[in-house]
Image (cartoon, rainbow, N blue to C red):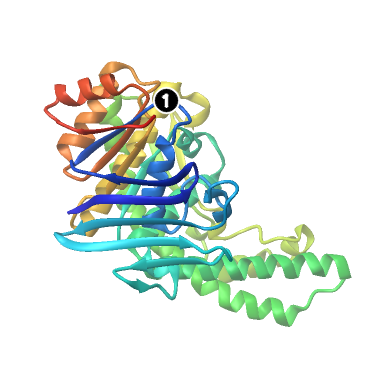
Amino acid sequence: MLHIQQIQLVQFKNYSSATFPFTARVIGICGANGIGKTNLLDAIYYLCFTKSYFNSSDQMNVQQGVQGMRIAANLTVNEQPTSITAIIRETGKKEMICNGEIYKKLSTHIGKFPAVMIAPDDIAIINETSDIRRKWLDTLISQINNTYLLQLIQYNKLLQQRNSLLKHAAERGVLNNDVLEILDHQIAPLADAIYSTRKQLLQRLIPAIGEQYRHIAGAPAEPITLSYESHLHTQNMSSLLQQNKQRDTYMQRTGSGIHKDDIGIHMHGQLFKQMASQGQKKSMLFAIKLAEYNLLQQQKGFPPLLLLDDVFEKLDANRMQQLLHTVCIEHQGQVFITDTHSERLLQHLQSIGITPQIISLS
């Protein structure tokens, strides 16, 4: 089991200095909008992933007007006491420390403390472009397979170099074919390996998402189809790069490869995001996240942390009750839930037999 006992925040977002003990398996974090509920969840996420769920820049996580920040937590993993600390120094340098040891590479930390976040803006996984779905998928696989994460980091680095080479070739009117060939030779095996890992995982995950959707949406559920879409279904990356070399040179970027992969979601043969109601989209989002949660639990042997940010504001009472039952009763992991109404949250949790810890922020 993975449980956080206490977290301390120093100069993190709106917190100058604060310590929160967590004494229960289900923790409600309540208070008015803008008080710091989401920031507290994000601090937990940061310790698991070495970065914020919401901000790409580390400096955006440092309290305004100061330099440097620190997040520290005491937790247990399968009853083994563990400490994690994230520090951004005044110089801007970032350090992650686990049980007193500083990581040489931050990527080593990913997956040790699995977590799943569900936040209002996650509806972009349904509504927006393929890069949002790939980011979600990559985050999931990286928690399970560290080799995949390293391959992905290297692939993206080489892809950036290849695109830069193509852009400079257009500006100068000449392409350095020798350098392009070297890059393609390095990129191709990485792409093939990433594709293979994604395909293998999605063969398990896609049916699980469909099953979760049918459970959440209730019978009779709409005919939903999900599929893994990739250029590599029909040929390997080396062939793709060779075949599209002229087009890539003209477009000044690499137009084919695993960086274009997507998860297709269709209903009645049409794009789900164009056909589905807001309720159906919300059901699909929860289905995706719960399938992710279940897969992590199967792979790790214990439930990940579940971070639910303001997900109940637009849910009807029945859907809220069903979701709480799923995440709090069927799963035995630690759950953190933010809500603006402590009485509402407490009432719903108590009705399914859960006595939560309520943290009221003011």
State the image quarter where residue 244 is shown. Answer: bottom right
Within the image, what quadrant is residue 239 found in? bottom right
Q: Is residue 207 left or right of residue 229?
A: left
For the question of whether residue 218 can be seen, the reply is: no
Quarter of the image for residue 335 reads top left
Is residue 293 positioned above or below 107 on the image? above
Residue 67 percent across, percent down from the top left: 57, 56
Q: In the image, is residue 116 above or below residue 328?
A: below
Mark 1 neighbour density, 10 Å: few (under 14) some (14–19) many (20 or more) = few
Residue 171 x %, y %? 86, 66
Which of 26 and 178 lies nearest the eye of the viewer? 26
Q: Three-letter amino acid code at disc 1?
A: Ala
Indicate whether 290 appears above or below 193.
above
Residue located 24% across and 56% down the image:
75
What residue sits 19% from the left and 33% below the top? 356
- Looking at the rendered image, the quarter that the C terminus falls into is top left
Q: Nearer the viewer, residue 242 or 297?
A: 297
**Image vertical order of residue 351 relative to residue 122, above or below:** above
* Callout 1: SS: loop
Residue at 33% x, 61% y: name it: 84
Q: Residue furthest top?
A: 317
Residue that mark 1 sits on: 32
Residue at image coords 35%, 21%: 315
Q: Position of residue 302 (x, y in %)?
A: 19, 54
Residue 130 location (% of width, % of height): 54, 45
